[in-house]
Amino acid sequence: MADQVMTPVDKEMAGFAHAEIKQRGIDLRLGVALEAVEFTPEANNTGKLALTLNNGNTLNTELLIMSIGVRPETKLAQEAGLQLGELGGISTNSSMQTSDPSIFAVGDAIEDTDFVTGKSGFVPLAGPANRQGRMAADNMLGRSETYQGTQGTSIVKIFDLAVASIGKNEKILKREGIAYDKVYVHTSSHAGYYPGAEIVSLKMLFSPDTGKILGAQAAGKDGVDKRIDVLAVAQRAGMTVEQLQHLELTYAPPYGSAKDVINQAAFVANNILKGDATPIHFDEIDNLTEDQILLDVRNPSELANVGFIEGAINIPVDQLRGRMDELPKDKEIVIYCQVGLRGNVAYRQLVNNGYKARNLIGGYRTYKFAKA
Amino acid sequence: MADQVMTPVDKEMAGFAHAEIKQRGIDLRLGVALEAVEFTPEANNTGKLALTLNNGNTLNTELLIMSIGVRPETKLAQEAGLQLGELGGISTNSSMQTSDPSIFAVGDAIEDTDFVTGKSGFVPLAGPANRQGRMAADNMLGRSETYQGTQGTSIVKIFDLAVASIGKNEKILKREGIAYDKVYVHTSSHAGYYPGAEIVSLKMLFSPDTGKILGAQAAGKDGVDKRIDVLAVAQRAGMTVEQLQHLELTYAPPYGSAKDVINQAAFVANNILKGDATPIHFDEIDNLTEDQILLDVRNPSELANVGFIEGAINIPVDQLRGRMDELPKDKEIVIYCQVGLRGNVAYRQLVNNGYKARNLIGGYRTYKFAKA
């Protein structure tokens, strides 16, 4: 059983969903499966349900809603002798033809081509289904339209939180052996001084070789759909993270920032690609060695208010130039701040002064929600 | 004096702003200039202002706010002997160097390259200024970053209405002699059955030769920034309206539709490019000839509720197949509905049955707001 909700995103990004769900008072149990359901009838056609979980726990309830995934319904296709794919969907080509060229298939029961890997994919979503339908109709009537692969763009609203993604997540990239690099940014959905701004937490996966976008995931209460849409277009257009820096997006205080979330993510990615930043990621922080020192460059009030990582030295970034000699040059300084920006400033200061350093990409916020 | 507000958009799109402004009780005067201001002092350092307009009218007020445009401040640059451009800004190359290569200039006082025309442009906006500053700093310190042109992406909030645009408007395309075609769509910002959906009114200008996006303008109370951002990315990536059909954007009922506004606009554009639709535009409707007949395919209740165009025959689209013989085959049937969709259905029916027809792109809604 998965140790996260929302498997299209990676676990640390699902943490934003976990936090929202728990904050709403829901008893969220991860990594456990339902093993048995027992119904005890009561008067007036009512009754009680006893749920046995695979960790031995029991839950009593009056209502059980099972939401256990999607499988393609292919009975008709199988009886017609049509070929199925490895994932169990009806095989189609880019003209939406099945293995019988006079039979077309579209929508939730088919396999089409994954935009990133070029392999067969199964993505039962309304957007692809609609466009496939239009193309199949065109092709049946003599046109020649080509379906151009599925990115798997998706979004879900969990109470007030939006969680969205495109392309491949890190789990899949690892499994497929596709080389990737990644960045996290947490940036305001619009200018902070205009009411209603919310943090957009964005993870972007890209190729270290070509700079192309492999996938992206975002969570937040405002502007998440817009940022994933921007990346959906950029990915489909084959843009690189270098090109993302130049995107010229709408800016007025109610709608965005002069440097949008996407520009910021591109800046961080390019800092890494150009060698201007040496990243460390959230899942390495709990396993630092004797040769590494953890440095928190936030202000003491932030540590008190939002928490900190045990064992960190605290030198606020604004004091770092004057206090640099408190740090050893023979160890690697692992820097973190709240979201990664001040950490980058500290990183540049230390490296320019002959220190070895790495900066936690996405800062304490990524580290913290990964555990949510 | 302009007969519209918001000159970055064309007049018919400014109509949405005019309607919003008037609906809020503001006395909007277009096409008139302020000719003289006379101050009559009163007690306690107060006073009254008499404003004389160039149409002879006079207005009395206690407060005058003049918002009369932006001109580059180039005094320092001129005194330094730097070259200015035709538009009055400081000339820069793509490295942000002025005519003196050791002096860099960025921001609101410079001219850079227009993304669409390749000519010198003057776009004093915060987004370009920020990215230019970053690049100039990099280049000063030995890097080689290239500014890649300004699209002029902009957005304004007028009460609850957003008005946004990218690229070139129709006025400029005409003036520059650039061939273009255009479409209008009015589509829900997200699934209509989920609360809070608002109509996004979108105008898209594209090259009839290459299919590339030349410009876009949108107005509405929800999701306008997102759609212009999507087109800003697509334009910068050099995508065609054919490719826009395939965009896979976030869809869940609170955020979008399975066929997004942008997909819909692309479908309409491609119908025109493929010859599946023969368009007529709002500004031709008031000048129909004896050889044209105006056909309103909406339901009678809509005509009563939202208005109609004088002289139109009304046959609802659902009755058209049975009542087609009421229409003459020797005249051109100019079809309109509310936004253009049912008009397209009617157009296909009529043309498939041997009629000559054109469909009003954007329907009655475009026609009506063009007069607002």
Image (spheres, coloured by chain):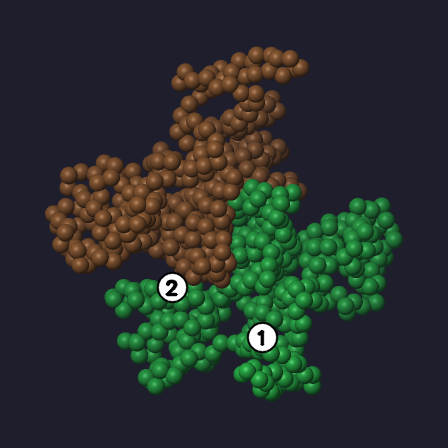
Chain colours: A brown, B green
Question: Few, some or many C-alpha atoms within 10 Å of disc 1 (few <14, some 14-19, many ≥20)?
Answer: few
Amino acid type at mark 1 = Arg
Q: Are marks 1 and 2 on the same chain?
A: yes
Above or below, A151 against B124 in this view is above
Residue at 41% across, 27% down: A30
Q: Chain of mark 1?
A: B
**Position of residue A232 measured from the top left corner of the image (x, y, whole percent):** 47, 48
Residue at 59% over, 62% down: B159
Mark 1 vs mark 2: in front: 2
- Taking the view exactly as shown, the residue that stands out farthest to the right is B326
Pointer 1 or 2: first along the chain: 2
Residue A354 visible in the displayed image: yes
Give the structural element (helix, strand or loop) at label 1.
Answer: helix
Residue that numbered label 2 is attached to:
B131
Question: Separation of disc 1 and disc 2 at Cα?
Answer: 29 Å
Q: Secondary structure at mark 2?
A: helix
- Residue nearer the viewer, A262 or B43: B43
Left or right relative to B145: residue B318: right
Q: Does A92 sit above or below residue A280?
A: above
* Quadrant in which the N terminus of chain B is drawn: bottom right
Give the number of callouts.
Answer: 2
- Residue B191 versus residue B124 in the image, above or below: above
Furthest toward the front, the residue is B44
Residue placed under numbered mark 1 in the picture: B175
